[in-house]
Image (cartoon, rainbow, N blue to C red):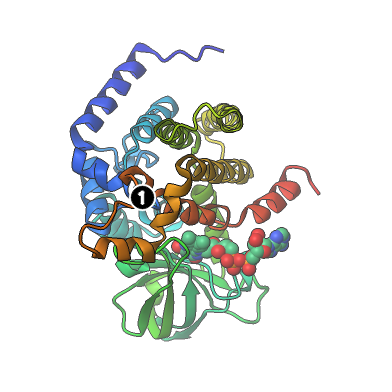
Amino acid sequence: MDLAFSADDLRFRDDVRAWIAENFDPKLKAMQAQSKNGYLDKDAMVAWQKKLYERGWVAPDWPVEHGGPGFTATQRYIFNMEMASAGTPATSPMGLKMVAPVLMAFGSDAQKAQHLPPILRSDIWWCQGYSEPGSGSDLASLQMKAERDGDHYVLNGSKIWTTHAQWADWMFCLVRTSQEKSRQEGISFVLVDMRTSGITVQALPTLDGPLEGQQEVNQVFFDNVRVPVANRIGEEGKGWTYAKYLLEFERGNAYAPGLKTALAKAKRLAQYEGVANDPDFARKVAELEIRIAALDATELRIFSSLSSGKSVGAASSMLKCAGTDTQQAISELALEAVGLYAAPFVADTWAELQGRSNAPRPGPEYAAPIAPAYFNYRKTSIYAGSNEIQRNIMAKLVLGL
Ligand SMILES: Cc1cc2nc3c(=O)[nH]c(=O)nc-3n(C[C@H](O)[C@H](O)[C@H](O)COP(=O)(O)OP(=O)(O)OC[C@H]3O[C@@H](n4cnc5c(N)ncnc54)[C@H](O)[C@@H]3O)c2cc1C
């Protein structure tokens, strides 16, 4: 197998590198280095996405007809690899990578025209309303009611763990339109304007520290929220099919490029702190390097088969488990690398020390986000369908158990 890039691919790689050097400026780099969850604040994320949009690269997976760049599979790989290697900020996935493919596949022409252009320009922010209290892994048990009243649905219930709902203009939402049909057939997929009256967004505190600026998850309450029937995607009662289609995109990420960058950072931290040559630490680094190399090869194989029009299918579950297990292992290694310096950054202690004049520095700046990131990354094996559930899916679809 010839893994060398063609001359055109190398030119494309140089273009991407040059663009990153020009646009990923020191201020953004500093913000990104202090992020505990990979996200910037909303203004900074939108500004970054708009820069990518102007270059035509904000939606690397979109087809050309909807404003995508028309990358080949190799270009997409190079683009993702260069962005991840440089440690550029994440784009918000809910619009660009989740609801957009569903709109393209199942939306009406009017829905595509209304939503796809502003998603591409990052003029509107989306959130995902799937999970409910009591309905996470067993998503088909969801209870949020949508009762028909003329040309509207009336929504009552709540959604939980809704990432960045506090910033969202729109939510794509699974609702129960029928109690009589089977659990799956009673579900519909609707688009909800978050400015509709009756919606309340409440922040959920998480293990990783104070909410200010980096609030991530919320509970969203719906009290007689009127949503036009015209905002339903596809057919009533077919929401489960569209929801599952979306989940393939949510889970079908390339993890290896970002993992290489994260591991390189953990190795740098270990050098600053003098633990890089500790045999036990070095062994863990070697094990992770091997895991990442194996994942990289698997991703290349899977994504090249996608270019021939196949869907990701159960492979997305495999990538999700392997990618997120490794993310967590690297966050544990980084914690080990900074050792005691992680401890003073427990939020209250940090705030208290900052408040005192001539307070001792609790540790080097590079150690500041390590413990919050460690706690934050516990989420990766839970969200997008927990890794236990992904293993069940693989057992059923791949092994036929
Ligand atoms: C940071 C974060 C962001 C999120 N963002 C969103 C979002 O934007 N929108 C959204 O809709 N949801 C979001 N989620 C919710 C996420 O999808 C759910 O947390 C996830 O599906 C698990 O559901 P649950 O929390 O109800 O846990 P449960 O389903 O109660 O599971 C609890 C534990 O039991 C295990 N378990 C459950 N059933 C089985 C089984 N059959 N076999 C083996 N093990 C099982 C699970 O793996 C888990 O370890 C987010 C979650 C997190 C943590």
Q: Report the residue that reaches farthest toward the right.
A: 401
Residue 377 higher or lower than 336, as above or below: below
- Is residue 228 visible in this depiction of the protein? yes
The percent position of residue 349, horizontal first and vertical second, equals 37, 63
The percent position of residue 375, horizontal first and vertical second, equals 49, 56
- Residue at 54%, 73% (x, y): give it: 132
- Residue at 60%, 71% (x, y): give it: 135
- Residue at 43%, 72% (x, y): give it: 204
- Is residue 101 visible in this depiction of the protein? no
Q: As shown in the figure, which amino acid type bears the numbered disc 1?
A: Ala
Along the horizontal axis of the image, is 30 left or right of 199?
A: left
Front position in the image: 214 or 76: 214
Q: Is mark 1 within 8 Å of ligand 1?
A: no
How many numbered tags mark residues here? 1
Residue 187 higher or lower than 319, as above or below: below
Front position in the image: 112 or 211: 211
Residue 123 occupies which quadrant of the picture?
Answer: bottom left
Along the horizontal axis of the image, is 233 left or right of 19?
A: right
The percent position of residue 384, horizontal first and vertical second, equals 54, 56
Residue 222 occupies which quadrant of the picture?
Answer: bottom left
The percent position of residue 113, horizontal first and vertical second, equals 29, 57
Front position in the image: 47 or 25: 25
Q: Secondary structure at mark 1?
A: loop
Along the horizontal axis of the image, is 93 left or right of 307?
A: left
Residue linked to disc 1: 368
Q: Residues within 10 Å of mark 1 (few under 14, many from 20)?
A: many
Residue 160 higher or lower than 322, as above or below: below
